[in-house]
């Protein structure tokens, strides 16, 4: 009885060392694979099995569909030098006889461009406003036309005037020379102003930016403005 009692109180068991090692290796092999057990207990050299990941087939590139429409640049005038003050270019041969008209003005480059159905038909150097009377940027519809307009603020002639804002900012004929400026208007050579005046309609859009450039394929107008 005393032997059995001591046995149950101490609850220890002697096991051969080889049995312990073998059991531990079996557990490792069960949980993490036989190779790990071999490295830990058997001195063997484990080599990871190569796993072949599925190779994705290349997806052929889909060429972007050319964008078409009256407000996408289709051609530009072949002008290979900066436009000098007082000079302009006008050539309607690349454009259809009729189509949507849109005008762009880049204040940084000091250039105005006229597009019909996406084809540039006219370009000229401009005068712009500075200081406390800068030329505003934005998209403006032509709201009034007056070939013989005189400013009621400055009492100055504004021939071939095409109004853009309620406070008087307009495109009009000017003496476009270096050193001159406007009070916020876009001044263009008189002959250019006349050509634009004769083909422009009320509601045609004028886009005034400060440094934006475009190339063939770029949209001139997008979204709600392209209508």
Image (cartoon, rainbow, N blue to C red):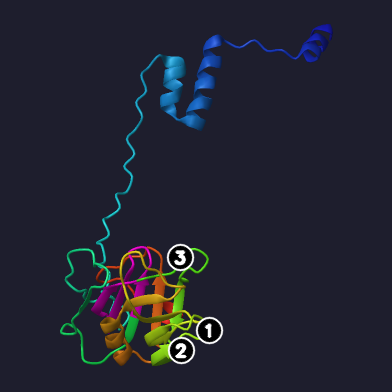
Q: CA distance from mark 3 to mark 2?
A: 23 Å
Q: Are marks 1 and 2 in contact (CB under 8 Å)?
A: yes
In the current view of this chain or complex, which residue is farthest to the top? 2
Q: Is residue 1 above or below residue 83?
A: above
Q: Residues within 10 Å of mark 1 (few under 14, many from 20)?
A: few
On-image quarter of the N terminus: top right
Instruction: Report the residue marked by disc 3.
Output: 130
Q: CA distance from mark 3 to mark 1?
A: 19 Å
* Left or right side of 7 for 70: left
Q: Residue at x 30, y 68 (%)?
A: 214
Instruction: Verify whether residue 115 appears in magenta.
Output: yes
On-image quarter of the C terminus: bottom left
Q: Is residue 53 above or below residue 213?
A: above
If you read the primary sequence from the N terminus, does the residue marked by circle 1 or circle 2 appear first? Answer: 2
Q: Is residue 185 above or below residue 148?
A: above
Q: Secondary structure at mark 2?
A: loop
Q: Position of residue 143 (x, y in %)?
A: 46, 89
Instruction: Report the residue marked by disc 1.
Output: 166
* Left or right side of 40 for 5: right
**Residue 198 shows in this picture:** yes
Q: Position of residue 7 (x, y in %)?
A: 77, 11
Q: CA distance from mark 1 to mark 2?
A: 9 Å
* Left or right side of 148 for 57: left
Q: Quadrant of residue 15?
A: top right
**Residue 202 shows in this picture:** no
Mark nearer the viewer, 3 or 1: 3
Q: Residues within 10 Å of mark 2 (few under 14, many from 20)?
A: some
Which contiguous range is marked in magenta?
A: 103-126
Q: Residue at x 37, y 23 (%)?
A: 46
Q: Tag on residue 143?
A: 2
Q: Quadrant of residue 97?
A: bottom left
């Amino acid at each position: 009885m005393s032997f059995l009692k001591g046995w149950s109180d101490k609850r220890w068991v002697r096991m051969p060392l080889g049995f312990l090692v073998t059991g531990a290796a079996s557990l490792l092999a069960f949980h993490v694979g036989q190779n790990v057990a071999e490295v830990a207990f058997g001195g063997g050299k484990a080599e990871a099995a190569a796993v072949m990941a599925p190779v994705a087939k290349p997806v052929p590139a889909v060429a972007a569909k050319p964008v078409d429409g009256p407000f996408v640049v289709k051609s530009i005038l072949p002008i290979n030098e900066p436009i000098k003050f007082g000079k302009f270019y006008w050539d309607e041969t690349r454009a259809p006889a009729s189509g949507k008209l849109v005008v762009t003005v880049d204040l940084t480059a000091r250039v105005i461009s006229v597009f019909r159905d996406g084809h540039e038909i006219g370009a000229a150097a401009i005068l712009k406003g500075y200081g406390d009377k800068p030329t505003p940027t934005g998209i403006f519809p032509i709201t009034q036309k007056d070939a013989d307009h005189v400013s009621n603020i400055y009492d100055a002639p504004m021939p071939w005037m095409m109004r853009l804002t309620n406070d008087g900012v307009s495109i009009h004929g000017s003496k476009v020379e270096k050193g001159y400026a406007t009070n916020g208007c876009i001044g263009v050579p008189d002959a250019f102003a006349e050509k634009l005046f004769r083909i422009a309609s009320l509601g045609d859009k004028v886009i005034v930016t400060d440094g934006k450039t475009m190339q063939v394929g770029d949209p001139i107008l997008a979204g709600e403005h392209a209508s």
